[in-house]
Amino acid sequence: MTLETESTVQSPAAQAESAAGSAPASVANASGLNAGASRLTEIIVVTSGKGGVGKTTTSASLACGLAKRGKKVAVIDFDIGLRNLDLVMGCERRVVYDFVNVIHGDCTLKQALIKDKRLDTLYILAASQTRDKDALNVEGVRRVLDELIADGFDYIICDSPAGIEKGAHLAMYYADRAIVVVNPEVSSVRDSDRVLGLLSSKTYRAEKGDTKVKEHLLLTRYSPRRVATGEMMSVEDVKEILGVDVIGVIPESADVLSASNAGTPVILHSQSDVAQAYEDTVRRLLGEDLPLRFLQEPKRGFLARMFGG
Amino acid sequence: MGLLAFFRRTPPTASVAKERLRIIVAQERTNRGGPDYLPLLRRELFEVIKKYVNVDADAIQVNLGKEEGHDVLEFSVALPGSESRA
């Protein structure tokens, strides 16, 4: 796969500065897109390698959590051919144009962005259902991201497809930050390590020798009870194997399925442990330092024990 | 919870998973970072060593590391009954 893109125009002063190892603060977290201009947009890829670990659930919830805090957020489904984010977000009947339509110039980006009905600053860009694997390309993705940046979006969440093929590659290519969703299970952990390898070699930042993509692990489907009985690897085990910091732990819960059934991102089910764990993750993304919660089996009250609640 | 685990029918397997992952991840990372010839080099070394000593394939470790600005290629061969470094 060719990864040629037009070279970014960077001022000689900026080049000298980065060569001296002191990048100016305004571009410290810019991925080279619109480099030079003070860009405050952060591009976050939600990826995993393995399928079914909770990437789309996570993308939807993080996007909602950021938008709830007043951030202008776009969440993009990169899973070309298998559109799913729209269902999880509950806007499947409002999809008129999709990501590939925008790239091919069939419509404008504004026409394709679906405004969320619950949160004013949240927009969804649906995946195309085309079977053409080459529908996405690096230049097209870049144009869309550049336009979102110019529109003043604070966050762009890229929901990666499973695997390490083209869609996954393009989803991570321009990322400033990566959230690697991992289940405490052997194949998921191994695949995550492959993805971490790609993040450090096959991204725009890696290829340009720019500062690294910030990597975080997000453990999902975590069962404190099974960890306690030694049947499931713990947060510490996974962190130790992969050597990457953990930005959140999402407990295993039936609420995830009921939320997706209803088309409401699970973070909006505020009484749920899962929602609170995602809220914590969002706050950590925004720079807060919070201890991990839901690592212990919840203590059941007297009544719950009596009646098996 | 050790007691609880004791009474369960399935033995606790998380530690087995962790150990297997630790080994395979380390091995895959070595191959990933380094040049493409490392896996082949490792295989050919194995063939040569096997002519003289009966060792398992996983007894040979090939690591590419960095030390004070230069790359160091390190072989480690665990001989049966003893361990030595070449």
Image: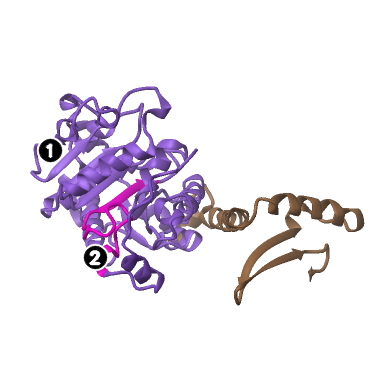
Chain colours: A purple, B brown
Find residue A116 and name its label. 1
Disc 1 packing (10 Å; few <14; some 14–19; many ≥20): some
Q: Position of residue A279 (x, y in %)?
A: 20, 55
Inspect the magenta stretch and tell me whether residue A85 lies in it: no
Where on the picture, by quarter, is residue B68?
bottom right
Q: Residue at x 39, y 74 (%)?
A: A20
Residue A170 vertical placement versus A177 (above, below): above
Where on the picture, by quarter, is residue A120?
top left
**What kind of secondary structure does the magenta stretch mostly adopt?**
loop
Question: Which range of residues does the magenta coloring cover?
Answer: A25-47
Q: Position of residue A25 (x, y in %)?
A: 26, 69
Left or right: A190 in relation to A105: right
Find residue A135 and name its label. none
Inter-mark Cα distance, 1 to 2: 30 Å
SS at badge 2: helix
Left or right: A201 in relation to A223: right
**Callout 1: residue from which chain?**
A
SS at badge 1: loop
